[in-house]
Amino acid sequence: MNILIHPTYFPTIATFATIVKADTVVMETQDNYQKQTYRNRCYIYAANGKLQLSIPVIYSQKNRQKYSEVKIANDYKWQDNHWKTLESAYRTSPFFEFYADELKPLFTEKFETILNFNMKCLEVVCECLQLEISLSKTKIFEKETPKIIDYIGLVNAKKEKPIKLQPYTQVFYSKHGFINNLSILDLLFNEGTNAITYLELQNVI
């Protein structure tokens, strides 16, 4: 099947569950940027529970901007903060050290736009998963895509539809129980080489 999704910041597990089953992944890059979405945020499992990591962007709601044109506010030291937070949350997970060298450059190299950064995050995670995907980008914005299954709704962070995933072992499970549909990083650090098998077994509607 061919699917349409948004490039997001370390996509959700549900998003990757659709990616692993797709023949072709089409990235929507020509729509307008919207707040309150996974475009610039992801959720991880920290010591106190679910934690949001947000990338600061230069964006005004008054003047509509294409997603591809929105710039990252690199005056903030968000990359250092995000990496330190990931280290604190996952350093005791089974596979953090296994993938750290591949992921850390994402938090040192500067990217101008949020779209380019998110595309790089997707590329690196696919390399970690040893997942090869057929990837393309939209050239124009189309409201309807009859030949492509639309998973655009997975980008919504605040209006997210309930998606029940199978539980897996998480670092702080004994404190807060299983937290559903976090960033792919949570699955990667906890399940490592078993992540692909897990993703293939999930049903995302």
Image (cartoon, grey):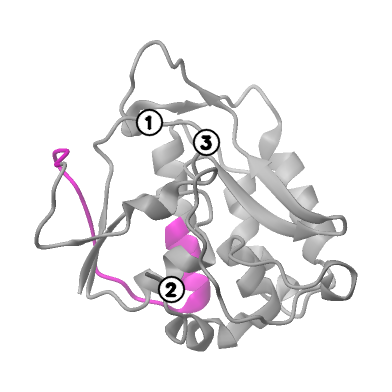
Q: Earlier in the sequence, mark 2 or mark 1?
A: 2
How far apart, in angstroms, are the residues tagged by discs 1 and 3?
A: 10 Å
Mark 3: amino acid: Gln
Front residue of 110/118: it is 118
Q: Position of residue 80 (x, y in %)?
A: 73, 41
* Residue assigned mark 3: 36
Report helix, strand or loop for mark 2.
Answer: helix
Q: Most extreme residue toward the top, as rendered?
A: 62
Relative to residue 77, is residue 79 depicted above or below? below
Mark 1 secondary-structure assignment: loop
State the residue at coordinates (37%, 51%): 153
In space, the residues marked 2 and 1 are separated at their CA atoms by 24 Å
Q: Residue at x 56, y 65 (%)?
A: 184
Q: Amino acid at mark 2?
A: Ala
Nearest the viewer among 152 and 128 is: 152
Nearer to us of marks 3 and 2 is 3
- The structure residue drawn at horizontal position 45% and vertical position 49%, both measured from the top left corner, is 8
Q: Position of residue 112 (x, y in %)?
A: 46, 30
Three-letter residue code for mark 1: Tyr
Does the magenta run of residues contain 94? no
Q: Are marks 1 and 3 in contact (CB under 8 Å)?
A: no
Asked whether 92 or 63 is in front, the reply is: 63
The residue to which callout 2 is attached is 17
Residue tagged 1 = 33
The picture places residue 134, in percent across and down from the top left corner, at 24, 69
Magenta span covers which residues? Answer: 122-142
Q: Which mark is residue 45?
A: none
Residue 134, compared with residue 203, is above or below; it is: above
- Image spot of residue 180 (x, y percent): 63, 67
Q: Residues within 10 Å of mark 1 (few under 14, many from 20)?
A: some
